């Protein structure tokens, strides 16, 4: 017995749960992005705001207002689309990570050797930012990041020591 409170079955459960927690919102965002993309491709173009060949002063003022509001709306739409594209990219990365976490957790549950390697890589990739954030944050944030770092190190230790020996 190594005295490590984090067992490999707990690490497997954590990986599977993390995969589900990351995967569900990522899938929802990607579905919404796809529906939005389809709706923008099939929508009709905006109506023409031309008031004819010889508009009077009030119609010119109204045309100026509609053009100004249209330009602001177009700017807001462009900013929103840029943010939505970024969110979709993050969701795609999240979905790939979720699949990796899910299969790693399932592989650890079946004691697959490849899952230990995958878990090691994923834990190191999670450990490095938590160490950096522990150096960056102050007070409670630092304490939380150090606790997370300790948890990752215990999980790595559990992965390194391997599966318990099974006696017949």
Image (tube, helix red, strand yellow):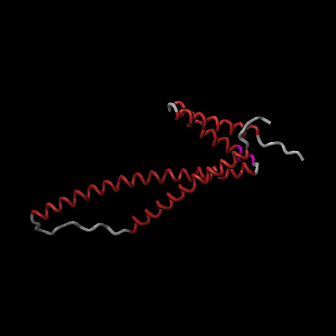
Which quarter shows the N terminus? top right
Residue 151 quadrant: top right
Q: Position of residue 42 (x, y in %)?
A: 39, 69
On screen, 140 above or below 44? Answer: above
**The one of 138 and 124 positioned closer to us in this rendering:** 138
Query: 67 left or right of 91?
Result: left
Query: 12 left or right of 25?
Result: right
- The total number of labels drawn is 0
Residue 118 quadrant: top right
Q: Position of residue 150 (x, y in %)?
A: 64, 35
On screen, 159 above or below 73? Answer: above
Residue at the extreme front = 140
Question: Which residue is depicted at the point 31% across and 67% down?
Answer: 45
Q: Position of residue 13 (x, y in %)?
A: 68, 49
Q: Which residues are magenta?
A: 112-116
On screen, 73 above or below 44? Answer: above
Q: Is residue 135 magenta?
A: no
Question: Which residue is depicted at the point 67% across and 41% down?
Answer: 120
Question: Which residue is depicted at the point 34% across and 56% down?
Answer: 77
Magenta stretch mostly in which secondary structure? helix
Question: Which residue is depicted at the point 46% across and 64% down?
Answer: 35
């Amino acid at each position: 017995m190594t005295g490590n409170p984090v067992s490999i079955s707990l690490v497997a459960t954590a990986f599977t749960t993390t995969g589900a927690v990351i995967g569900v919102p990522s899938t929802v965002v990607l579905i919404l992005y796809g529906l939005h993309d389809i709706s923008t491709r099939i929508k009709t173009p905006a109506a023409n705001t031309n008031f004819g060949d010889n508009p009077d002063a009030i119609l010119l003022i109204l045309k100026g207002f509609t053009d100004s509001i249209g330009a602001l709306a177009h700017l807001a739409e462009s900013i929103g689309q840029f943010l939505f594209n970024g969110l979709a990219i993050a969701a795609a990365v999240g979905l790939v990570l979720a699949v990796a976490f899910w299969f790693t957790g399932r592989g650890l549950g079946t004691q697959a050797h490849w899952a230990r390697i995958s878990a090691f890589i994923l834990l190191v990739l999670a450990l490095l930012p938590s160490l950096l954030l522990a150096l960056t944050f102050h007070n409670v944030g630092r304490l939380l990041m150090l606790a997370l770092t300790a948890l990752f190190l215990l999980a790595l230790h559990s992965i390194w020591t391997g599966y318990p020996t099974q006696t017949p």
